[in-house]
Amino acid sequence: MEYRILKAVSSYFDDIHIIGTGDGSWLRHSRHCRAFHDLGKPFALAGPGEASTIDSYAKDHQISCILPTCGHTTRFLAAYPDSFETPCFPVPAGQAFDLLNNKLTFYQLCRDLDLPVPGTRIFETWSELRAAAATGALIYPFIVKPTNLDGGWGVRRINGPEDLLGRIDYSPILAQDFIPGRDLCVFYLCERGEITGQVAYTFARHGIRFVRRPNVNAFSRVVAAHLKLDGVIGFDLRERADGQVFFIESNPRFWFRMDVMTLAGLDFIRAALTKEALGKGPPDGLELRNRGRLFKAAVLPWRLNWLERRVIRELARDPVLPLLEMLGRTKPAGPPLPRDQTIVTIPANVTPY
């Protein structure tokens, strides 16, 4: 995700420095990266000392703005707003971020605000969950997931007793009713509780499809106003065939497809920093194939739509990192594992673009 954020940022900034850990040092091979500086510790463990170090680095290199890339860096900027003299990209307040970034507290927030959510229960152990399923307190199928991991880590659909064999070594365990339908992703740019721009898409057979969802926007304004949100916020929902939607989780940070949104005319970074209107974005129904399908389709370029042609051109402008990624030479960020525990489930399949 960090590479895609780098590409999104490059649409507005010409000179980009990256501060990260050794795992992200491969980003230095991008044409968009002017310099890479190793922080020396993960951002999840960073404190006010690291904030001062970053601010000093920004002053020494005449950096005009500090931006996050992921949940940990967003939380870091939210935790130490007074440690930076260099301007920072707007992020939610620390308390609001923590509320939104935890699946259980987000569910409770939605209940308090009378927003639609699936039935949800919390269990401390796998044994407790299995006992509840055996007594009929949980109805198949249902979804189990951790409360505080990103990227689909630990998420499983339980279709019947056979799927309850083995164990899950994280705690607590969130169990939610399975909602038949399709996934829906919406993202917003907020300023002091007001939504100033948005985009929504569902997943097509070979990629994503842009859609308009005024009913979801109305629900989301309630959350933004209640928490007086700043910056970028995303929501994952399930949409039934009858149009009813259910909030599943929230992502109070930048997200995986921000670079594609920029190419589609939805430059969230520019809009936030310049206070310009975000724009309406692609028309309802426009589809974008995933990267593998795009490469195959590029041999017949007249079959590509305007957004797919832009994506292909942008990949060609910075080919080294996409090639390293395809060859498996990059190291993906894993979940922050609980101490002395191992995640035994596999991450959900993620389709680039």
Image (spheres, grey):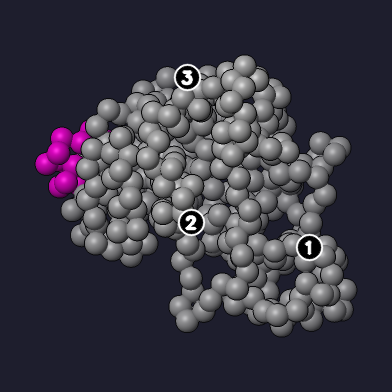
Judge whether residue 57 is colored magenta: yes
SS type, badge 1 = strand
**In this figure, what is the number of numbered marks?**
3
Q: Which residues are magenta?
A: 55-66
Upstream in sequence: badge 3 or badge 2: 2
The disc label shown at residue 73, or none = none
The image quadrant of residue 175 is bottom right
The image quadrant of residue 122 is bottom right
Mark 3 or mark 2, whichever is nearer to me? 3
Residue 206 in percent (x, y) is at: 68, 38
What amino acid is labelled 2 in the image?
Asp
Relative placement, left or right, of 129 versus 154 is right
Q: Is residue 36 above or below residue 305?
A: below
Residue with the most extreme front position:
299
Identify which residue is drawn at 46% across, 66% down: 336
Q: Which residue is mark 1?
A: 142
Mark 3–mark 1 distance (CA, rounded to whole Å): 40 Å
SS type, badge 3 = loop
What amino acid is labelled 3 in the image?
Ala
Residue 10 in percent (x, y) is at: 35, 31
SS type, badge 2 = helix
Q: Which residue is mark 3?
A: 277
Q: Which residue is mark 2?
A: 98
Upstream in sequence: badge 1 or badge 2: 2
Mark 1 or mark 2, whichever is nearer to me? 1
What amino acid is labelled 1 in the image?
Phe
Q: Is residue 330 above or below residue 209?
A: below
